Amino acid sequence: MSMTIAEKILATHGGRDRVEPGELLFAKVDRVLGTDVTCSLSIEVFRGMGVERVKNPDTLVLVNDHFVPAKDIKAAQLSKNMREFAREQGVENYFEVGRSGICHSILPDKGFVRPGDLVVGADSHTCTHGAVGALATGIGSTDMAAAWALGELWFRVPETIRLEISGEPDPWIGAKDVVLHVISLLGVEGALYKVLEFHGPVIEAMSMDGRFTVTNMAIEAGAKSGIIPADATTLDYLRTVGIAGAEPIDADPDARYASTIPVDVGSLRPQVAKPYLPSNATDVEEVAGEHVDQVVIGSCTNGRLEDFEIAAEILRGRKVHRDTRLLVIPSSQAIYLELLKRGLAGVFVAAGAAVTPPTCGPCIGGHMGVLAENEVGLYTTNRNFVGRNGHPSSRVYLSGPAVAAASAVAGEITPPYDVRVNTKLQAAKG
């Protein structure tokens, strides 16, 4: 058939036998994701269309996650608008504070996404859900209103870049290091309106937690989506979230790609992206010694159980540096509960970290951890644009959980294999 994964999904959902890159088509959507910060505008547009009822309320998933718990009256009103709309329209898949989490953790872990699905969401990191073999992409609030009303949207069939990730990485290398390296190779516009299709032995050996990290950051290279073929690892995960009978999905052997890029991560060092772009990734040694005021471990990118297990192993029996703040943010209530059950939350608290409810807050500089003037952060989040995380003069570096945890202990950016007391800062303190 000569189609990529994205082309197969769009053809199926558009009622076509096949599609070609560049074609325009209407396609039915399986899931429409909205959040507290994106729904209010969509509701306004929806009302303006003169439509009274959502076409397929069972396809909607509405999640409180960005400014939660509500940080002020405006944030509270945003949540109220979505809450009342869900009630009015009979939307069962509505997730309230205390029973919620970050949307890109909720959707897959609640069994709302399966291989071959077409998923849209009014959040740019909707591409995360490509980890299960879906075509998932971010849309604007106006398009979300149209999807509510029609149950379908128009799409331009994107080209696909095939990435072959190979090599035997160092044990300290995680999914975040791999994807930061890929973005540094492509640049922030290197995959503009294309799909990144991830293949190779490194991807095949990666856990689902790692795969979610990889596809989450496809948008940081300008991609329409990131997709990983659904294999035995995917199907095993889906069974744990209540999806039985899912089928593997992969590209055809003779599928045509815009390009095929081999990426050998056998000699890759832990990566850190310097301000102010995710593509500014470099070896951790190149920025080691940079003081950090705040470290954040969590978000939709690295807020899953595996990430906290890695961080806890480094923090166990150690203390967060006295000149550094550490925030630990699980991406869902379910993961928060696992941190408690497994004693990981205790490790973080004993080390001097603040463990918070699930929220996007610090990632978008909106809540529970905003940076002050000239402060420096090291985050496991996905973006470090100017002013995104707080004051315009603040600077944020991006890393995986291992580098973040080690740096919280040292008080400066530090390789995970070189956790040490920050003697430079202590000397400065006298």
Image: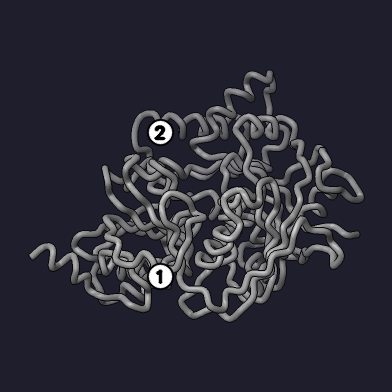
Residue 366 versus residue 217: which sits nearer the camera? Answer: 217
Element assignment for label 2: helix
Outermost residue toward the front in this view = 286
In the rendered image, which residue does mark 1 sit on? 402
Identity, as a three-letter code, of the amino acid under mark 1:
Ala
Whether residue 300 is situated above or below residue 58 in the rendered picture:
below
- Look at 30% across and 55% down and name the residue there: 294
Count the marks: 2
Q: Which mark is residue 75?
A: 2
Residue 424 versus residue 135: which sits nearer the camera? Answer: 424
Look at the image and tell me whether residue 278 can be seen.
yes
Q: Tell me if mark 2 has few (under 14), some (14-19) or many (20+) residues whose alpha carbon lies within 10 angstroms of its own.
A: some
Q: Residue 410's x, y, as percent?
A: 26, 69
* Image quadrant assignment for residue 246: bottom right
Image position of 33 (left or right of 300): right
Q: Residue 399's x, y, as percent?
A: 43, 62
Look at the image and tell me whether residue 68 can be seen.
no
Q: Residue 114's x, y, as percent?
A: 70, 57
Outermost residue toward the left in this view = 430
